[in-house]
Amino acid sequence: VTSYAAIIAGSDLVDGAGGMWPMLFYCLRCGDANAAKSVIAQFGNIGGNIDNINLIDPAVSDLIFQLADMQKHRDTIFGDANNNSPSRPEPQQHSMLSPSQAMMQSRRVISDLYERVKTRMTSSSSELEPTVVYQAACLAKLSGAESISEASCLASSGLVRTVEDYLYASLWYALHLSNSASSAGGESDGNKMEAAISRLGMLVNEWGPSYFEEDDGNEGFSDATDAVASRSGESGGARNEIPRSGGWAYAFPLLASQQYATALAYLAEAGGGLGLLQATHVALIMDTMGLPIDDFSLDGRDKSRSTQTLFPMLVTSYSASLQGSDAGAALQYLMVLSRQGSLIKEQVQRLLLETRQFEIMAGKIEADGSRTNAALDAHFSKTEVSSILADAASNAMRAGKAADAAELLVLSGKFSSLFMLMNRELASYLVVSSQEDFDKRQFWFNAASQFHQLHLSPGKTYVVDTLNAEGCMSLGNTFQLLMNLIVFFDRCRDHQWEGAWDLMDNLQLLPKNDSEMTVKVEAFQELDSCIRQVFHHVILASMEALCHIYKSLKQAGSSVSFDQRNAVEHNLLGLQTRARLLVIFSRLINLPNSGNADTFVRLSQLEKNMM
């Protein structure tokens, strides 16, 4: 410290009259009362004349000796700098926040001494000795009468040059305003301390990042006292680049003045990916220790607001930054918010949909229908996981991601919802007119076929058992019918008319004779609405298949023998009868009045072509 003081203050000053004051100041600046005690022992002369720069008042030496006794073997009066020290801190009867009566008495005496020196400094017309500045600064620090960063008599001293100088001086001053005693007739010293910290936080916020972040090669602000005097400053606006400090130049003074929420929010925003990582983990530590992540103030506002909003925001943002490379790690961070109720489940659903890492997150379905190897199972019950997956599927549907929704519904075990989705999609693309729609239809047909193969193959009954238990077997029947109808339309598209008609006949949707008409109309009314809505396409395609078979048969009959012609005529008559029944059936199911009048006109035209 002596060598450092000689470099900063100048060896001539340190070696001259009153040279112990610069050394004493820098001992106090680094919080080492033991070093200050050594300076007094080696260079100080105890005396009661404050006007003599070479003398140190007994109250000063007494207080420093008491602080040294309080510090004992620790690195500083504030604590041990060696975090790896195995020794436990010794219990202290008194501390900086709870000083003894002897310390309080010494402070009062030193405060009077400071006022005398300050008066002499402000009233003197001649140039003061440089050591007087250090003397006044030492007295201000020890008495807690005034922060040296804001003392008018020290404004031009240059003792406060960096952010750390300013914060240290301000916090030393706030620390002296302990709540161990009250001022006579005034507010408690504890209230004064809170007010000092609140004021420091207000000033740091007011100055903004531009005062602290390195700019044009200047680190921080060069004269903190000027900033205090002006009480104003341009707040730091949006930065296009990450500041050289990574955001810590401004975050550090915010943290020191207990502006925790503002500090972490700024660090996360200004520091880029690394700043977000650091802010999130500082917030995690604070949350684990039960510390509120708020900005200290005296206005009595709800201080839980920042903890409830900023902390989840930091965690979810950091989790989102990980999900592209490691969805499992992103999930681990989200689980920190397990106490946040519905928020955690919403974020897990977001993670599922954005990463689409369904097998990692939700596992896979085994042969017995159970779901295994899911990362989510380590944090939620099976029922909760199923609910999360089902809700994520609903969100996927709202976002237009039906394929993701289907996969999530399989994993959730919500087979009735899955069949409703697949039935709706299959029916939507039953008849297509563009290549894009045909590709979607093929996708859903392949997906449905794969589902059938994996989960409805012989020996696997869990899907059927689930549908039966829920009273939803009709959904499975609709699914099977739609799959067959897609094959029917594919055959029509490929002009496989006889194969298409044979399949339709086997599906038993259309009447074969007059006696079946009532039964088939009633059966139509029992069909799922998704099939009824497209059934006019089924009737029209069936009539087209009949018409093409009729024409082919009629052309072939012209070249057959007389004996075979009777058989051909019989078959042609049978096709005409089926066409007639089809037109009647379409009327009975109210096809002309259900918005499909054009289809009915087309049916009538095709029937006439078979006359």
Image (cartoon, rainbow, N blue to C red):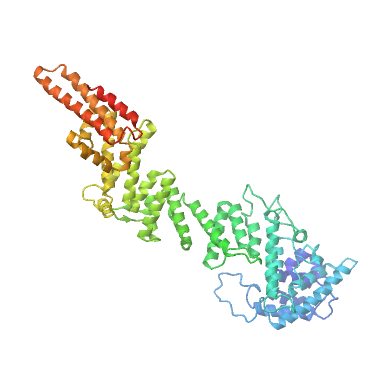
Res 326 seen here: no
The percent position of residue 80, horizontal first and vertical second, equals 61, 72
The N terminus, quarter of image: bottom right
As drawn, 531 above or below 183: above
The percent position of residue 13, horizontal first and vertical second, equals 81, 67
The C terminus, quarter of image: top left
Residue farthest to the bottom, as pictured: 102
Image quarter of residue 348: bottom left
> In screen coordinates, is 282 left or right of 563?
right
As drawn, 509 above or below 203: above
> In screen coordinates, is 451 left or right of 146?
left
Q: Which residue is at the front of the view, 330 or 237?
A: 237
Which residue is drawn at the image coordinates 69% and 64% (left, top)?
A: 200
Image quarter of residue 257: bottom right
The percent position of residue 234, horizontal first and vertical second, equals 71, 53
Residue farthest to the left, as pictured: 563
Res 176 seen here: yes
> In screen coordinates, is 21 left or right of 363?
right
Q: Which residue is at the front of the view, 108 or 347?
A: 347
As drawn, 30 above or below 591: below
> In screen coordinates, is 288 left or right of 234?
left
The percent position of residue 195, horizontal first and vertical second, equals 69, 69
Q: Which residue is at the front of the view, 134 or 187?
A: 187
